[in-house]
Amino acid sequence: MEKADRAVLKKWISLSGAVLAVVYSVNCFLLYPLTASVTNNVVYAETAIPMLLEYIAELLELGGISMCYAVMLLAVYTWGTKSVKGVFGTFCLVTFYKYMANTVSSWVNGGSIPLSWAWDLTDVLFWTLLEFLQMFIIFSLSKGIITKYTDKRLVMLRASKKTDEHIEGIPPHAYPFQSIIDNGNCLLRSAFICATVTLIAKLGGAVISDVWLIIAYGIPTEGITWLYMAVNYLIKAIMGCISYLFVYAAMSSLTKDLEA
């Protein structure tokens, strides 16, 4: 990798890590305490405001994570799979910061460090690894699509130059994007994978959470509870779709560094 390429990759990794760190800080030290305060206030507890604040925090987090996904996909496309080590390392470090900050914040709010602090730290590591696993799954599914596309393009370009004749059917450069959705574009197909994995994770997490609540407290008897559950599932599904737009927007912005 040339010096200029390393500078671009370093810039992308630093930017994505900084954005994600800021998002996690805003959520942990502003939105989460505000949500807790509103929830404990009898005036607002039964309104949609607490849920709205939770979704705002989740949407901010989705944007930050999507930027990391975008950097990962572009790194694989531009410099190969080995270039994503820095992306993985930064993502894990900032994710660890998120869960550690939330844990320490809960200790401060509780007034002391609980006797179960070791379990709390274990949870931090567990959830950090779980989020990394989701990123690694996306990487594993996307790298085959991207590598196949770039290898085919490279082989055909070399053949075209060697024969000094234009060969039909050479895959175009993946960016700049010609449309928001393009199944023939390896980067946009990979963005769709990001959205699909995100949708499955969010929807699956919501369902599992509701199942545990039903096991613990029984089947809800009020219709409004079922309505809230249905709305929550719908919003989780919508966020999966939004993650595609976030990844698309991040890649569109970042590739300007390569087009210059």
Image (cartoon, helix red, strand yellow):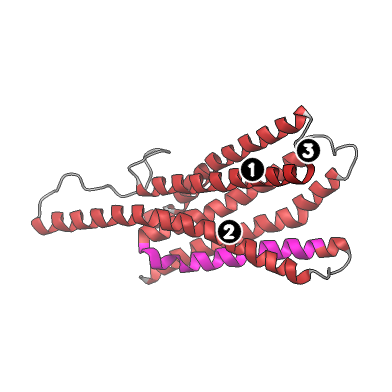
| Front: mark 3 or 2 | 2
| Type of amino acid at the residue the image marks with label 1 | Val
Could you tell me which secondary element the residue under label 2 belongs to?
helix
**Highlighted range, magenta:** 79-106
Residue to which mark 2 is pinned: 131
Per the rendering, the mark at residue 207 is: 1
| Relative to 138, 20 lies left or right | right
Image location (x, y in percent) of residue 189: 39, 45
Task: Give whichever of 202, 246 is nearer the camera.
Answer: 202
Residue to which mark 3 is pinned: 49
| Relative to 74, 60 lies left or right | right
| Type of amino acid at the residue the image marks with label 3 | Ile
> Residue at position x 39%, y 60% from top?
76
> Residue at position x 53%, y 60% from top?
133
| Type of amino acid at the residue the image marks with label 2 | Glu
| Relative to 225, 62 lies left or right | left
Task: Give whichever of 10, 187 is nearer the camera.
Answer: 187
| Residue 91 is inside the magenta segment | yes
